[in-house]
Amino acid sequence: MLPYFAFLLFQAAPLFDGQTLNGWHAASKPEDKDKAFWTVRDGAITCDSLGRKEHDYVWLVNDREFSDFDLEFQVRGFRRSTGNSGLQFRSRYDAAAGWMNGPQVDIHPPAPFRTGLIYDETYETRRWIFPSLKNWEIAPDQGPKKWLWRYSDEGDGWNNIHLTCRGTKVTTVVNGIVITDLDLGSVLDDEAHRRHNVGRSGNFALQLHSRDELLIQYRRFRLKTIP
């Protein structure tokens, strides 16, 4: 029989095998379906839309669903990229509406103070939920007082992000600095999130923002599920 602690935290199957996009699929409006923005390059999931901004949102969605978990991964941003990305969690894509509902860890190299804050893409919400703001607008003085970001030409260029979800408690740590640490139950348990079945369970997804020219890479996903 396994010891008691083994039942508390389980290592899930890898999200990314380092070579292919097996276990992931692109989600977008029909006009963007055949545009290969998401590929694997140098052992990393890569989004490259430089010079190709004629697109709507294009998501790379993991096939599996998760509820409570600890997730660590690395991300690399490039100075010549002006686009926005992020990691959706406990989210679901509504193909009929062409929309991804659910919360997102923002990853924004052009304004890196935003990285690790929580934006909610849920159609009825569409605003920052940490910090709690009225819409998508945010100024540096509304972000964390301390943060650290490395561009691709600084050291090895990779940034470490750690996301933990237990119930409605969400914590993000970027390069060793706690950015978000809050119970978001007032949002994640509201009527809109229940209607879309998001906020408490769902998929991971990586974002290419509408009409953005983005170059970004993701690798070394380490996931532990909490039963």
Image (cartoon, grey):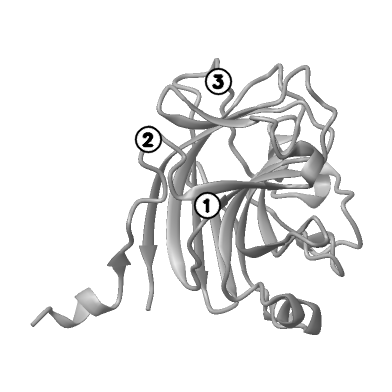
Which quadrant of the figure has residue 191?
Answer: bottom right
Where in the figure is residue 40, as x and y percent of width and height?
Answer: 48, 29
Q: Amino acid at mark 2?
A: Gly
Residue position marked by numbered label 2 in the rendering: 18
Q: Amino acid at mark 1?
A: Val
**In screen coordinates, is 13 left or right of 33?**
left
Q: State the residue at coordinates (83%, 61%).
A: 97
Q: State the residue at coordinates (49%, 63%).
A: 164
Q: State the residue at coordinates (55%, 63%).
A: 171
Where in the figure is residue 64, as x and y percent of width and height?
Answer: 48, 62
Mark 3 secondary-structure assignment: loop
Question: Can I make out residue 177 in this image?
Answer: no
Q: State the residue at coordinates (63%, 21%).
A: 78
Residue position marked by numbered label 1 in the rendering: 173
Frontmost of labels 2 and 1 is: 2
Where in the figure is residue 47, as x and y percent of width and height?
Answer: 62, 31
Frontmost of labels 1 and 3 is: 3
Taking 32 as reference, is 137 above or below it? below
Q: CA distance from mark 1 to mark 3?
A: 19 Å
Sequence-wise, the earlier of marks 2 and 3 is 2
**In screen coordinates, is 75 left or right of 208?**
left
Q: Nearer the viewer, residue 191 or 70?
A: 191
Task: Answer whether labels 2 and 3 touch (C-beta < 8 Å).
Answer: no
Question: Can I make out residue 132 in this image?
Answer: yes
Q: Residues within 10 Å of mark 2 (few under 14, many from 20)?
A: some
Mark 1 secondary-structure assignment: strand
Q: CA distance from mark 2 to mark 1?
A: 23 Å
Residue position marked by numbered label 3 in the rendering: 152
